Image (cartoon, rainbow, N blue to C red):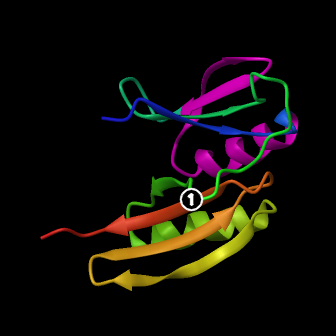
Amino acid sequence: MIGYVTIGTNDMDKAVEFYDALLGELGAKQAFGMDRIKFWSTGPNSPMLAVCIPYDQQEQHRGNGNMVAIPGGSREGVDKLYNKAIELGATCDGPPGERMPVFYGAYVRDLDGNKLCFFEMKMS
């Protein structure tokens, strides 16, 4: 259903370093890109995450209410991604924990303030 999600950055080099290391934990690699935009994917026909310098060349602003949710695969995986993001300079926006009986999640803000959620959802 989702092809890719794009989030903005004011510093492409820092964003690439952050997302190479963070998404590498999931086996994702840069799929393609150019100077102002880079895409990461875990493989063909998989949803992608893109980081870009805004097309209008104005400063990046995080969207209030916007968030990218990245599956952790397990509670341990959620914890691992959360800890890696914090290690890479992200800030906590909600530590790992059970939010409801079927949802375990953790929230961070990346280096540009974009909100990320790492999650595990168990639906019956």
In the rendered image, the residue lying farthest to the top is 34
Label 1 Cα neighbours within 10 Å, binned few <14 / some 14-19 / many ≥20: few
Q: Is residue 85 left or right of residue 76?
A: right
Q: Position of residue 72 (x, y in %)?
A: 45, 61
**Residue at x 60% of width, y 46% of height:** 23
Closer to the camera in the image, 89 or 59: 59
Give 22 or 48, whichever is nearer the viewer: 48
x and y percentages locating residue 64 in the rendered image: 63, 57
Question: Which residue does the numbered mark 1 point to in the structure image?
Answer: 65
Q: Quadrant of residue 92?
A: bottom right
Quarter of the picture containing the C terminus is: bottom left
Instruction: Find the magenta span and give its range.
Output: 13-40
* Residue pictured at 51% horizontal, 49% vertical: 26
> Does residue 39 sit above or below 71 in this rendering?
above
Type of amino acid at the residue the image marks with label 1: Gly
Q: Secondary structure at mark 1?
A: loop
Residue 78: give x, y in percent of width and height: 49, 68
Q: Is residue 26 magenta?
A: yes
| 16 sits to left or right of 67 | right
What is the residue that sits farthest to the left in this orientation?
Answer: 124
Image height check: is 44 above or below 20?
above
- The residue shown at (38%, 60%) is 73
What residue sits 57% from the left and 68% below the top?
Answer: 80
| Relative height, residue 37 to residue 119 (above, below) | above
User: Can you give x and y, in whole percent of width and height, for residue 49 in the image?
Assistant: 55, 37
